[in-house]
């Protein structure tokens, strides 16, 4: 059974790290930085499905650079692991669009 992590209302790096830490039960010593995130995500037992709802709002709130850095790490882990999937959801004119990372 896959581990599912739902991220929503992300408005800062602090909120992102808090939600992903809780959702994936990352260790208490997890350092809230990109290198530690990649290491921790590679250590999470799979399969893992990560859903980031309204990712565009998160990008707007936390800033383009922070968002691009986080999503680069998420997509890197997804490309390295067959059992780690990332879905980003963003509202569009027709409702919701989803972008999987495999």
Image (cartoon, rainbow, N blue to C red):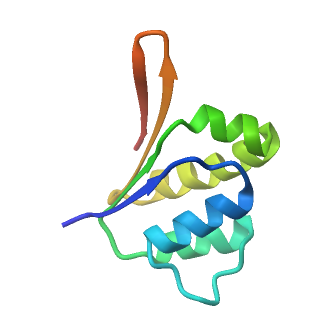
User: What's the residue at 47%, 78% (across, down)?
Assistant: 43
Q: Nearer the viewer, residue 32 or 46?
A: 32
The N terminus lies in quadrant:
bottom left
Q: Quadrant of residue 96?
A: top left
Q: Looking at the image, is 61 positioned above or below residue 10?
A: above
Horizontal side, residue 50 vs residue 26: left or right? left
Q: Residue 13, position in %: x, y?
A: 73, 58
User: What's the residue at 49%, 23% (across, down)?
Assistant: 91
Q: Looking at the image, is 53 positioned above or below residue 3?
A: above
Q: Residue farthest to the bottom?
A: 29
Numbered label tally = 0
User: What's the residue at 57%, 38% (across, down)?
Assistant: 55
Q: Residue 60, position in %: x, y?
A: 73, 34
Horizontal side, residue 26 vs residue 71: left or right? left
Q: Looking at the image, is 10 positioned above or below residue 24?
A: above
Q: Quadrant of residue 24?
A: bottom left
Q: Quadrant of residue 16?
A: bottom right
User: What's the residue at 59%, 89% (across, down)?
Assistant: 28
Q: Nearer the viewer, residue 66 or 40?
A: 66
Horizontal side, residue 45 vs residue 71: left or right? left
Q: Residue 93, position in %: x, y?
A: 48, 10
Q: Residue farthest to the left?
A: 1
Q: Residue 102, position in %: x, y?
A: 40, 44
Q: Looking at the image, is 94 positioned above or below residue 84?
A: above
């Amino acid at each position: 059974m896959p581990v599912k992590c739902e991220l929503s209302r992300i408005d800062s790096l602090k909120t992102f790290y808090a939600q992903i830490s809780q959702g994936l039960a990352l260790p208490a010593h997890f350092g809230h930085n990109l290198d530690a995130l990649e290491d921790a995500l590679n250590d999470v037992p799979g399969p893992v499905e990560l859903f980031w709802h309204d990712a565009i709002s998160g990008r707007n709130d936390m800033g383009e650079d922070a968002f691009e850095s986080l999503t680069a790490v998420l997509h890197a882990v997804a490309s390295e692991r067959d059992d780690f999937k990332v879905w980003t959801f963003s509202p569009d004119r027709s409702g919701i669009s989803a972008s999987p990372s495999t």
